[in-house]
Amino acid sequence: MSKISVAMTTYNGEKYIIPQLYSVLNQSVKPDEVIICDDCSTDSTVSLINEFINENKLTNFRLISNENNLGYIKNFRKAISLTSGDIIFLCDQDDIWQEDKIRIMAELMENNKEIKALASAYKLIDAEGNEIKGDSEKFYNPKGSSLLSKVNYGKSLYYNIAQGCAEAVSSDIAKAYCQSTAAILPHDWALNLLAYEKGGLYFINRELLLYRLHGNNTTGISDKGASVEERIPRLKSYAAYMRDIINLPLQKESQSEYLSIASLTEHRINFLTEKRLSSYIKGFCKHFTVIRRYFFMTYLKDLYLVLLRKI
């Protein structure tokens, strides 16, 4: 039986932390260890966690309070680095796990050693816990009814296919990430890319947690409805992520492709800013390969927005 770790981060999560802790505690297959890194909360999060651990006599739960605020990416890297399990589940402070989440995902990973990262589907709930419908097109949605599917094409290069809170990763992938120098790329995206590179990125089409949407979420579900004013800043962030990816231990071919995507994204920013047709055509010719593979419709949309003076 694999050793199961949970890497959890918290920051000012007093409103939702206890239901989440109980959902981890009440799993049908218990985790061997739960590492919780609190990022200098100023509310009662830390005291609530300590009370929960003491009241339930949980010797396998460990709370670490950071001396300085690290931010969510570095805090998750710290939590992951402190785990010792064969399979590491990532855990946010405000969701609710279905009671069979660990059992189902761990069994799949144990029975298929090829799986290096496994993400599940999830239901959306609002701040009060009511189920809601949301736009999840940004994340992986495989066609067909297969329970388990391999992500075997370039979607993970184009965007992050899953929220970290829905994910479990193998210890070797976790170790590779923690030893890398990637600094700004979201931790879950980095882990997915490392798993994808090894042919081990999988998705289970089963809703195994309740993902809570509220005003304080670090990340949301989709940026499909982003305003025109938000478009260029988001492209700048995306270009920075692509350049940060080369700090992961990836093959040279992959690093070259990420740099090409970063270059294309920077070219798109220039075109959307300068609005010159000659610049658009030059970018199309220079970056045709990655445009054809990942960005064809997106690149056409850039032209549409400029021609209709939407940006």
Image (tube, rainbow, N blue to C red):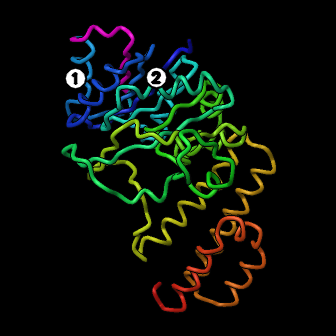
Residue bounds of the magenta highlight: 55-65
| Residue drawn where x is 53% and y is 41% of the image | 188
Depth check: give the residue in front, 213 or 73.
Answer: 213
The residue labelled by disc 2 is 103
Depth check: give the residue in front, 273 or 83.
Answer: 83
Expressed as whole percent of the image width and height from the top left, the position of residue 162 reads 50, 46
Expressed as whole percent of the image width and height from the top left, the position of residue 22 reads 27, 24
The residue labelled by disc 1 is 47
Question: In this image, 250 relative to 131: left or right?
Answer: right
Q: Given this view, does label 1 or label 2 mark the residue nearer the observer? A: 2
Depth check: give the residue in front, 157 or 47.
Answer: 157
Rounded to the nearest angstrom, the CA distance separating label 1 from label 2 is: 29 Å
191 shown above or below 24: below
Question: In this image, 80 relative to 123: left or right?
Answer: right
| Residue drawn where x is 64% and y is 42% of the image | 150
Expressed as whole percent of the image width and height from the top left, the position of residue 204 reads 52, 39
Check the image and name the residue furthest to the front. 145
Identify residue type, mark 2. Answer: Arg
Question: In this image, 168 relative to 95: left or right?
Answer: right
Label 2 neighbourhood size at 10 Å, few (<14), some (14-19), many (20+)? Answer: some
Discs 1, 2 touching: Cβ within 8 Å: no
Quarter of the figure with residue 110: top right
Quarter of the figure with residue 115: top right
Expressed as whole percent of the image width and height from the top left, the position of residue 72 reads 43, 41
137 shown above or below 49: below
Identify residue type, mark 1. Answer: Ser
Is residue 262 a member of the stretch shown in magenta?
Answer: no
Of mark 1 and mark 2, the one earlier in the sequence is 1
